Image: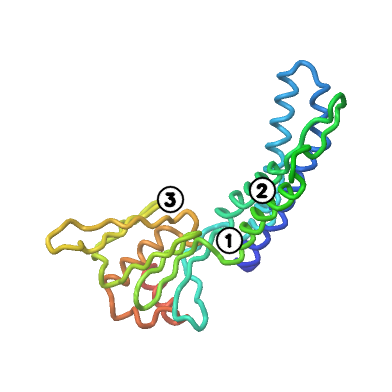
Amino acid sequence: MPLRTARLLVWPFVVAAFVLRVCVELWLKPVTWRIDPGWVAFLVWVAVQVTCFLVPWAGHALLTRGVRQRPATWEVAAGTGSFVASTSPRWISPRAILFGWLAGGLVLTERVPGEDRVRLADLFGNVALSIAIPVVVLAGTAVVLTLNRPRLTLDRNGITKQSVTRRTFLRWDRLLPGGPPAPTRKAATITIQRQPATPGGPPVPSPLPTGPLHVDPAFLAETIRHYVEHPEHRADIGTQHELDRLRAALA
């Protein structure tokens, strides 16, 4: 399964988490009111709410299990002269599904007076708000999934860190050789040392989150160290030939 497909397949499960929570609010919640004692009803309620998140998350994890392992390689972005580490499905999946689950909770409901039923809250403008606010949350989630954020891009000039909302560029010639040190495979962050703004000053650390990226953290650190110390290879970044050479050199 292509990585982009695995990432975009999160969307149906986001919608599923939203629908499940709304259905629970409207139809299962009244059932818990008839359960005694109260602490049992509370535990049932919590278990059902957690299930509304876990079932879609497990479904997506099972469907994309073949591409969840972070590889020791880069994507070659055709026509852009760059290597790209896209958003990892294993990172974006629980976060996107959580937003779908939270969107379901933004549909405001209330108990029908004197009855064991639930309805939309009788508040001014509630119908419009109960539609508009979840739609905004779900649309924002869809945009993040489509735009492939966060991600990391390497080109002949440097490194571009693209978070969900912010972009940071680090020039190769401003990075200090010898780093970053090799992290563990489960490392959440590696630290790149930049030249100080003033001569003689201490190096400036620049943290680089690795958890969201679909690339092995150790391979990522070795790639950065390699291009900092071997500027003659930077011009070929973004080609399959250079990727093959890089993987052979770091093997």
- Gap in angstroms between the C-alphas marked 1 and 3: 21 Å
- The image position of residue 35, as x and y in percent, is 81, 21
Which type of secondary structure does the marked residue at label 2 adopt?
Answer: helix
Q: Is residue 154 left or right of residue 115?
A: left
- Amino acid carrying mark 3 in the image: Ala
- The image position of residue 134, as x and y in percent, is 69, 50
CA neighbours of label 1 inside 10 A, class few (<14), some (14 to 19), many (20+): some
The single residue placed furthest to the top in the displayed view is 37
- The image position of residue 20, as x and y in percent, is 76, 44
- Gap in angstroms between the C-alphas marked 3 and 2: 21 Å
- Amino acid carrying mark 1 in the image: Val
Q: Residue 190 sits in which quadrant?
A: bottom left
- Gap in angstroms between the C-alphas marked 1 and 2: 17 Å
Q: Is residue 215 left or right of residue 171?
A: right
- The image position of residue 62, as x and y in percent, is 68, 52
Relative to 184, is 234 above or below?
below
What residue did someone put label 3 on?
A: 188
Q: Are marks 1 and 3 in contact (CB under 8 Å)?
A: no
Q: Earlier in the sequence, mark 1 or mark 3?
A: 1
- Amino acid carrying mark 2 in the image: Trp
| Marker disc for residue 144 | 1
Q: Residue 147 sits in which quadrant?
A: bottom right
Relative to 104, is 142 above or below?
below
What residue did someone put label 2 on?
A: 57
| Marker disc for residue 31 | none
Q: Residue 176 sits in which quadrant?
A: bottom left
